[in-house]
Amino acid sequence: MDYPLISVIIPCYNHEKYVEQAIASVLAQSYPNVELIVIDDGSKDGSVKLLKELAARHGFRFVSQSNRGVCRTFNRAIREFSTGEYVALLASDDYWQAEKLAKQMALLAASPAAEFCFTQAQEFADDGRLLRIFPAKPKTGKVTSQVFLRQGVPAGSMLFSRKLYDKLDGFDESLKEEDWDFVIRCSAETEFVAVREPLFYYRWHQGNTMKTRGRAEIFRQKALILSKNFHLVSPQRWFLAMSIHFAHDIFLARMLGK
Protein backbone atom coordinates (compact mmCIF):
# COMPACT_ATOMS: atom_id res chain seq x y z
CA MET A 1 0.00 0.00 0.00
CA ASP A 2 1.20 3.51 -0.85
CA TYR A 3 1.56 5.94 2.06
CA PRO A 4 2.17 9.49 0.74
CA LEU A 5 4.14 11.70 3.12
CA ILE A 6 2.06 14.09 5.23
CA SER A 7 3.66 17.26 6.59
CA VAL A 8 2.08 18.28 9.89
CA ILE A 9 2.57 21.91 10.92
CA ILE A 10 2.21 23.06 14.54
CA PRO A 11 2.71 26.79 15.20
CA CYS A 12 3.25 27.61 18.89
CA TYR A 13 2.78 30.92 20.68
CA ASN A 14 2.84 30.95 24.50
CA HIS A 15 1.38 27.45 24.79
CA GLU A 16 3.98 25.85 27.02
CA LYS A 17 1.09 24.38 29.00
CA TYR A 18 -0.48 22.61 26.01
CA VAL A 19 1.99 22.05 23.18
CA GLU A 20 3.44 18.75 24.42
CA GLN A 21 0.00 17.14 24.20
CA ALA A 22 -0.43 18.44 20.64
CA ILE A 23 2.96 17.02 19.62
CA ALA A 24 2.31 13.69 21.34
CA SER A 25 -0.95 13.30 19.43
CA VAL A 26 0.89 13.70 16.12
CA LEU A 27 3.67 11.30 17.09
CA ALA A 28 1.01 8.75 18.11
CA GLN A 29 -0.71 8.74 14.70
CA SER A 30 -1.22 5.27 13.26
CA TYR A 31 -0.51 6.59 9.76
CA PRO A 32 3.10 5.52 9.08
CA ASN A 33 4.54 8.37 6.99
CA VAL A 34 4.45 11.74 8.78
CA GLU A 35 6.94 14.57 9.13
CA LEU A 36 6.32 16.99 12.00
CA ILE A 37 7.37 20.64 11.83
CA VAL A 38 6.92 22.80 14.93
CA ILE A 39 7.53 26.55 14.72
CA ASP A 40 7.61 28.74 17.79
CA ASP A 41 6.34 32.18 16.83
CA GLY A 42 8.11 34.37 19.38
CA SER A 43 6.74 32.86 22.59
CA LYS A 44 7.45 34.72 25.82
CA ASP A 45 6.83 31.76 28.14
CA GLY A 46 8.93 28.60 28.41
CA SER A 47 7.78 27.13 25.08
CA VAL A 48 11.14 27.40 23.29
CA LYS A 49 13.07 25.57 25.98
CA LEU A 50 10.45 22.83 26.13
CA LEU A 51 10.26 22.47 22.35
CA LYS A 52 14.03 22.18 22.01
CA GLU A 53 13.98 19.36 24.54
CA LEU A 54 11.08 17.59 22.82
CA ALA A 55 12.69 17.95 19.37
CA ALA A 56 15.93 16.44 20.65
CA ARG A 57 14.00 13.57 22.21
CA HIS A 58 11.62 12.80 19.33
CA GLY A 59 13.47 14.00 16.24
CA PHE A 60 10.93 16.38 14.72
CA ARG A 61 11.88 19.63 12.97
CA PHE A 62 11.86 22.63 15.30
CA VAL A 63 12.18 26.24 14.19
CA SER A 64 12.20 29.32 16.41
CA GLN A 65 11.40 32.76 14.98
CA SER A 66 10.40 36.25 16.04
CA ASN A 67 6.66 36.82 16.06
CA ARG A 68 5.09 36.84 12.58
CA GLY A 69 1.52 35.74 13.27
CA VAL A 70 -0.10 32.41 12.56
CA CYS A 71 -0.80 32.97 8.86
CA ARG A 72 2.75 33.91 7.90
CA THR A 73 4.02 31.10 10.11
CA PHE A 74 1.90 28.51 8.30
CA ASN A 75 3.12 29.73 4.93
CA ARG A 76 6.75 29.76 6.00
CA ALA A 77 6.55 26.26 7.47
CA ILE A 78 4.91 24.81 4.37
CA ARG A 79 7.05 26.62 1.78
CA GLU A 80 10.44 26.43 3.47
CA PHE A 81 10.43 23.22 5.49
CA SER A 82 7.69 20.79 4.42
CA THR A 83 8.29 18.06 1.84
CA GLY A 84 5.01 16.14 2.05
CA GLU A 85 2.53 15.45 -0.71
CA TYR A 86 -0.18 16.37 1.81
CA VAL A 87 -0.33 18.98 4.57
CA ALA A 88 -2.20 19.02 7.90
CA LEU A 89 -2.39 21.83 10.46
CA LEU A 90 -2.73 21.67 14.23
CA ALA A 91 -2.82 24.49 16.78
CA SER A 92 -0.51 24.01 19.74
CA ASP A 93 -3.38 24.01 22.26
CA ASP A 94 -5.38 21.28 20.48
CA TYR A 95 -4.77 17.61 19.69
CA TRP A 96 -5.82 14.67 17.49
CA GLN A 97 -7.22 11.19 17.94
CA ALA A 98 -4.65 8.56 16.88
CA GLU A 99 -6.52 7.37 13.77
CA LYS A 100 -7.19 10.84 12.34
CA LEU A 101 -4.67 10.94 9.51
CA ALA A 102 -5.11 7.27 8.57
CA LYS A 103 -8.87 7.63 8.23
CA GLN A 104 -8.55 10.85 6.25
CA MET A 105 -6.00 9.42 3.84
CA ALA A 106 -8.12 6.31 3.29
CA LEU A 107 -11.09 8.50 2.44
CA LEU A 108 -9.05 10.65 0.07
CA ALA A 109 -7.69 7.54 -1.65
CA ALA A 110 -11.28 6.43 -2.27
CA SER A 111 -12.33 9.91 -3.52
CA PRO A 112 -10.36 10.83 -6.67
CA ALA A 113 -12.22 14.14 -7.13
CA ALA A 114 -11.19 15.40 -3.68
CA GLU A 115 -7.95 17.00 -2.52
CA PHE A 116 -9.34 18.28 0.78
CA CYS A 117 -10.55 16.29 3.79
CA PHE A 118 -11.71 17.34 7.23
CA THR A 119 -13.29 15.73 10.28
CA GLN A 120 -15.76 16.65 12.96
CA ALA A 121 -14.31 18.23 16.08
CA GLN A 122 -14.88 17.64 19.77
CA GLU A 123 -14.79 20.91 21.69
CA PHE A 124 -13.72 20.55 25.31
CA ALA A 125 -13.11 22.88 28.24
CA ASP A 126 -9.75 23.45 29.86
CA ASP A 127 -10.94 21.35 32.81
CA GLY A 128 -11.65 18.38 30.51
CA ARG A 129 -15.44 18.76 30.18
CA LEU A 130 -16.78 17.79 26.75
CA LEU A 131 -18.84 20.65 25.32
CA ARG A 132 -20.06 19.93 21.78
CA ILE A 133 -19.29 18.15 18.52
CA PHE A 134 -19.11 20.32 15.41
CA PRO A 135 -20.08 20.60 12.64
CA ALA A 136 -23.19 18.55 13.35
CA LYS A 137 -23.65 17.76 9.65
CA PRO A 138 -20.40 18.09 7.67
CA LYS A 139 -20.90 19.44 4.15
CA THR A 140 -19.16 17.45 1.41
CA GLY A 141 -18.86 17.46 -2.36
CA LYS A 142 -19.00 20.84 -4.08
CA VAL A 143 -19.53 23.05 -1.06
CA THR A 144 -18.64 26.62 -2.05
CA SER A 145 -22.15 27.97 -1.51
CA GLN A 146 -22.32 26.38 1.94
CA VAL A 147 -18.87 27.35 3.25
CA PHE A 148 -19.40 30.88 1.94
CA LEU A 149 -22.16 31.34 4.52
CA ARG A 150 -20.13 30.09 7.46
CA GLN A 151 -16.87 28.35 8.27
CA GLY A 152 -18.08 24.79 8.71
CA VAL A 153 -14.61 23.21 8.58
CA PRO A 154 -12.65 22.92 11.85
CA ALA A 155 -9.25 24.34 10.91
CA GLY A 156 -7.28 21.85 12.98
CA SER A 157 -8.92 18.96 11.16
CA MET A 158 -7.95 20.04 7.63
CA LEU A 159 -5.85 17.78 5.42
CA PHE A 160 -5.14 18.94 1.87
CA SER A 161 -2.77 18.24 -0.98
CA ARG A 162 0.36 20.34 -1.39
CA LYS A 163 -0.65 20.66 -5.04
CA LEU A 164 -3.87 22.40 -3.99
CA TYR A 165 -2.00 24.68 -1.56
CA ASP A 166 0.45 25.72 -4.29
CA LYS A 167 -2.32 26.33 -6.80
CA LEU A 168 -3.95 28.78 -4.36
CA ASP A 169 -0.61 30.34 -3.39
CA GLY A 170 -1.18 29.41 0.24
CA PHE A 171 -2.81 31.46 2.97
CA ASP A 172 -3.60 35.14 2.49
CA GLU A 173 -1.30 36.94 4.92
CA SER A 174 -3.37 40.13 4.79
CA LEU A 175 -6.24 38.42 6.64
CA LYS A 176 -6.83 37.36 10.24
CA GLU A 177 -9.53 34.80 9.40
CA GLU A 178 -7.14 33.06 7.01
CA ASP A 179 -8.55 29.57 7.52
CA TRP A 180 -12.06 30.54 6.33
CA ASP A 181 -10.67 32.31 3.28
CA PHE A 182 -8.51 29.27 2.49
CA VAL A 183 -11.49 26.92 2.85
CA ILE A 184 -13.61 29.03 0.50
CA ARG A 185 -10.88 29.14 -2.13
CA CYS A 186 -10.18 25.41 -1.79
CA SER A 187 -13.87 24.63 -2.25
CA ALA A 188 -13.82 26.36 -5.63
CA GLU A 189 -11.02 24.06 -6.83
CA THR A 190 -11.87 20.63 -5.41
CA GLU A 191 -14.59 18.55 -3.84
CA PHE A 192 -14.52 18.14 -0.06
CA VAL A 193 -14.76 14.85 1.83
CA ALA A 194 -15.22 14.46 5.59
CA VAL A 195 -14.71 11.78 8.21
CA ARG A 196 -17.91 11.94 10.23
CA GLU A 197 -16.20 11.34 13.55
CA PRO A 198 -14.76 13.85 16.06
CA LEU A 199 -11.09 13.03 15.48
CA PHE A 200 -9.90 16.57 16.28
CA TYR A 201 -10.07 17.94 19.84
CA TYR A 202 -10.52 21.71 20.10
CA ARG A 203 -9.69 23.26 23.45
CA TRP A 204 -11.99 26.05 24.69
CA HIS A 205 -10.18 28.58 26.88
CA GLN A 206 -10.12 32.34 27.32
CA GLY A 207 -6.96 32.68 25.25
CA ASN A 208 -8.62 31.43 22.04
CA THR A 209 -8.09 33.98 19.28
CA MET A 210 -11.78 34.47 18.54
CA LYS A 211 -12.43 35.22 22.23
CA THR A 212 -9.81 37.98 22.44
CA ARG A 213 -11.05 40.05 19.48
CA GLY A 214 -13.92 42.54 19.50
CA ARG A 215 -17.03 41.68 17.51
CA ALA A 216 -16.62 44.70 15.21
CA GLU A 217 -13.12 43.57 14.24
CA ILE A 218 -14.33 40.02 13.69
CA PHE A 219 -17.04 41.29 11.35
CA ARG A 220 -14.56 43.51 9.50
CA GLN A 221 -12.33 40.52 8.83
CA LYS A 222 -15.28 38.44 7.67
CA ALA A 223 -16.40 41.23 5.34
CA LEU A 224 -12.92 41.36 3.80
CA ILE A 225 -13.06 37.64 3.05
CA LEU A 226 -16.57 37.73 1.64
CA SER A 227 -15.76 40.72 -0.56
CA LYS A 228 -12.52 39.17 -1.77
CA ASN A 229 -14.34 35.98 -2.82
CA PHE A 230 -17.46 37.71 -4.20
CA HIS A 231 -16.85 36.21 -7.66
CA LEU A 232 -17.25 32.63 -6.41
CA VAL A 233 -20.96 32.87 -5.58
CA SER A 234 -24.09 34.63 -6.79
CA PRO A 235 -24.71 38.25 -5.67
CA GLN A 236 -27.70 36.98 -3.68
CA ARG A 237 -25.52 34.48 -1.80
CA TRP A 238 -22.94 37.16 -1.09
CA PHE A 239 -25.60 39.53 0.28
CA LEU A 240 -27.09 36.76 2.43
CA ALA A 241 -23.68 35.93 3.90
CA MET A 242 -22.90 39.57 4.68
CA SER A 243 -26.32 40.03 6.28
CA ILE A 244 -25.99 36.94 8.47
CA HIS A 245 -22.60 37.94 9.83
CA PHE A 246 -23.57 41.58 10.32
CA ALA A 247 -26.61 40.47 12.30
CA HIS A 248 -24.51 38.11 14.43
CA ASP A 249 -21.37 40.17 15.00
CA ILE A 250 -22.75 43.72 15.10
CA PHE A 251 -26.50 43.89 15.67
CA LEU A 252 -26.98 40.91 18.01
CA ALA A 253 -23.71 41.58 19.87
CA ARG A 254 -24.83 45.15 20.61
CA MET A 255 -28.26 43.95 21.72
CA LEU A 256 -26.61 41.54 24.16
CA GLY A 257 -24.04 44.11 25.28
CA LYS A 258 -21.04 42.16 24.00
Image (tube, helix red, strand yellow):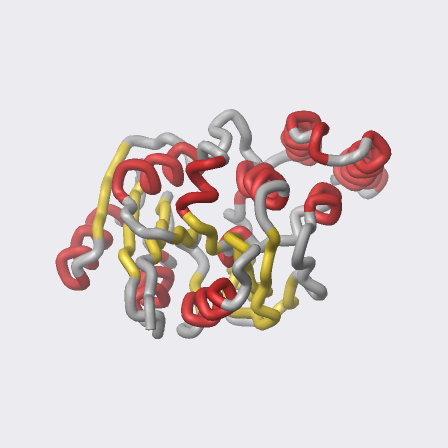
Q: Residue at x 26, y 35 (%)?
A: 65
Hey, which residue is sitting farthest front in the picture? 112
| Residue 127 visible in the displayed image | no
Provide residue 46's location: percent of width, then percent of height: 26, 48
Provide residue 161's location: percent of width, then percent of height: 44, 50
Residue 226 vs 124, above or below: the answer is above
Q: Residue 43 lies in what quarter of the image?
A: top left
Q: Is residue 66 left or right of residue 70?
A: left
Provide residue 192's location: percent of width, then percent of height: 60, 55
Provide residue 247's location: percent of width, then percent of height: 83, 38
Q: Is residue 26 left or right of residue 156?
A: left
Q: Nearer the viewer, residue 9 or 67?
A: 9
Q: How many numbered dots are placed on residues in this image?
A: 0
Q: Residue 221 lies in what quarter of the image?
A: top right
Q: Residue at x 20, y 59 (%)?
A: 54
Residue 130 vs 141, above or below: the answer is below
Residue 223 vs 46, above or below: the answer is above
Q: Is residue 229 left or right of residue 116?
A: right
Hey, which residue is sitting farthest left in the picture? 56
Q: Nearer the viewer, residue 186 or 137?
A: 186
| Residue 23 visible in the displayed image | yes
Q: Residue at x 45, y 59 (%)?
A: 94
Q: Residue at x 71, y 64 (%)?
A: 137
Q: Nearer the viewer, residue 128 or 141?
A: 141
Q: Residue 198 lies in what quarter of the image?
A: bottom right
Q: Which quadrant: the N terminus?
A: bottom left
Q: Which quadrant: the C terminus?
A: top right
